[in-house]
Amino acid sequence: MQGTLLKRNSIILWSLKTYNPLRQFYCAALSDPQYAHLHFLRFRTPHETQQWLVSLPASSQDQVG
């Protein structure tokens, strides 16, 4: 198992390599007029994410039956 975490196709290595470029891309996209029609949601904590999920209306699929 030694050395498997940083192999070429490792998800951990991929996340370490792409974190900053993707973060920069999405930060730039937030202020790009090309994406002005999109509504970006930024969750900084799991609690914020949970609050948003709880605030969503139940889907019609859940109400059937």
Image (cartoon, rainbow, N blue to C red):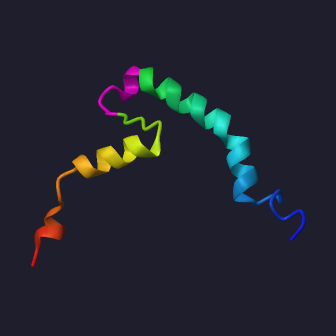
- Does the magenta portion include 38? yes
Report the residue that reaches farthest toward the front.
47
> Residue 38, position in %: x, y?
32, 33
Q: Is residue 4 left or right of residue 20?
A: right
Q: Which residue is located at x 60 percent, y 37 percent?
A: 22
> Residue 63, position in %: x, y?
11, 69
Report the residue that reaches farthest toward the bottom.
65
Q: Which residues are magenta?
A: 32-39
Q: Is residue 54 left or right of residue 17?
A: left
Report the residue that reaches farthest toward the right.
2
- The quadrant of the picture occupied by the C terminus is bottom left
Q: Is residue 56 left or right of residue 29?
A: left
> Residue 47, position in %: x, y?
40, 44
Question: Foreground: 50 or 4?
Answer: 50
> Residue 56, position in %: x, y?
22, 50
Q: Which residue is located at x 73 percent, y 43 percent?
A: 17
Q: Which residue is located at x 65 percent, y 34 percent?
A: 21
Question: Foreground: 13 or 34?
Answer: 13
Q: Which residue is located at x 76 percent, y 60 percent?
A: 9
In this picture, is 49 found above or below 42?
below
Majority secondary structure in the magenta region: loop
- Does the magenta portion include 26? no
